[in-house]
Amino acid sequence: MKDFRVTPIRNGTVIDHIECGQALKVLRIIKVTGDVRSTVSVLMHVPSKKEGWKDVVKVEDRELDPREVDKISLIAPKATINIIRDFNVAEKYSVTMPDVVKGIIKCGNHNCITNKNEPVEPEFIVESKLPVVLRCKYCDRNQEDFAERLA
Amino acid sequence: MTSMTFKGLDIVSIRDLTIDQIEQVLDLSEKMMPYATGEKTCKALDGKILANLFFEPSTRTRLSFESAMSRAGGKCIEITMPQTSSTVKGETLADTIRMVEAYSDAIVLRHPHEGASRLAAHFSRKPVINAGDGAGQHPTQTLLDLFTIKQQLGGISGKNVVLVGDLKYGRTVHSLAEALAMFGAELTFVAPPLLQMPNETAKLLENEGVKARLCSNLEDVIADADVLYVTRIQKERFPDLSEYEKVAGCYRIDNILLREAKKGLVIMHPLPRVDEIAPEVDMTENAKYFQQAFNGVPVRMALLTMILGGELR
């Protein structure tokens, strides 16, 4: 008999091929906190045919919005998103990291003009995708610990 | 003749300019010398208005922009005391810029927050020149520094430029190091570990193929220097005053140190200085920092003429 660690979901999203150790940050990005009304499954450090080991997050009755997918791409650039409808994979795609990240995090430099109540969205140039390096378009600073601020 | 590629260009970071564009500015700066000294009169910017917005104290940069605009035949309007402007009423910089652009042909901005000039350029249809944004960029200082090195040594490529002092918070040295790397200079950074060049700048230099020599002892490198670029350790940029006290006064250039230097060493400083260069050095042939301060006028005349589409006849 096949041993399922997590059963298939009827409707929702499976975020697969998350880099090992990043699943909890993905949960924070998609705002899964203690107060959930649908089943959420988290698998950490499971075998992967592609990368050796991976994390997986399954969220029932939720489809992600593009901003959430952009955020996930920054901490899990190899992740795939599977949209499940009636137990079938209705859509499947890999996350793609944008060349410019707009509005989804604040600049980590407190003295940056974008942190001073000006009418602009923070904007970051993706200088490198592996490892991810983000540079503020305004103050030119590379962003440290941005994964924490994403979540 | 001015280049059409320059007209309307924002100068926020030295990286906004190519080497060719920088060379064009330096060439026109040389031609501006007799006009900058007042020997000849110039009407290249007749009828043009420059808005000088200084939200932080400035002496040389503000005065030399004013002098440059006047020498080129134009006029300035200014905010030099933010406490007398709408900023104190809570006006955003974005709104101030949209108002000021209606009164002027170009905007010069100094601001305490990093990225302020990039934001201003985003909101202004008129060209914006960054005159210093917090601990960020100060591209016109870089242009006048490059001009001074070229003027004094005949070129920049292959010269050993030693940058000493506050390389972490000093905004002039970040832009200058990047530009010197573009021009093929050799770089040596002398600073206590707390004030060494930030990783971002070091990385940018590596991308240009330049591996700078790092050291904390000036005596070890003075003999090989063609240019000694000295900076003040800026108390106002330190988030933690105890950090400042650990490094204040750690370098001092005096005639004893200069005994080890090359005869033609060029000593530069963006000024103001406190005690990092002894007054006795002012009398030596090596001291070029007041010439450097003057060079702000021809260089800014050249830049303003180019971005405002003026003609030097």
Image: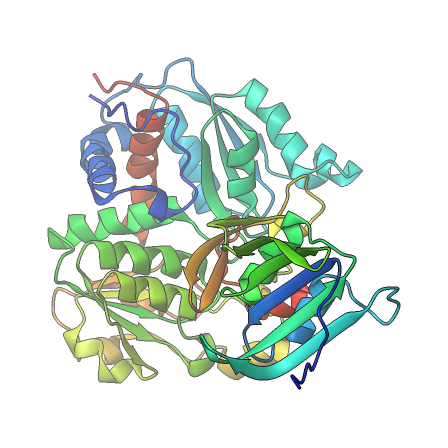
Say if A29 sits above or below B213 in the image: above
Q: Position of residue B147 (x, y in %)?
A: 23, 46
From the viewer's perspective, tell me whether residue B186 is left or right of residue B204: left
The quadrant in which the N terminus of chain B is found is top left
The residue at the far top in this view is: B47
The image quarter containing residue B239 is bottom right
From the viewer's perspective, tell me whether residue A2 is left or right of residue B73: right
Q: Name the residue nearer the viewer: B282 or B53.
A: B53
Say if A36 sits above or below B55 in the image: below
The quadrant in which the C terminus of chain B is found is top left
Q: Name the residue nearer the viewer: A68 or B282.
A: A68
Q: Position of residue B155 (x, y in %)?
A: 12, 52
Give the residue drawn at x 39%, y 26%: B8
The residue at the far front in this view is: A1
From the viewer's perspective, tell me whether residue B192 is left or right of residue B113: left
Q: Name the residue nearer the viewer: A151 or B96.
A: A151
Q: Position of residue B227 (x, y in %)?
A: 21, 64
Give the residue drawn at x 48%, y 48%: B132
Give the residue drawn at x 45%, y 69%: B168
The image quarter containing residue B176 is bottom left
Residue A150 makes an appearance in the image: no
Q: Name the residue nearer the viewer: B49 or B93.
A: B93
From the viewer's perspective, tell me whether residue B40 is left or right of residue A54: left
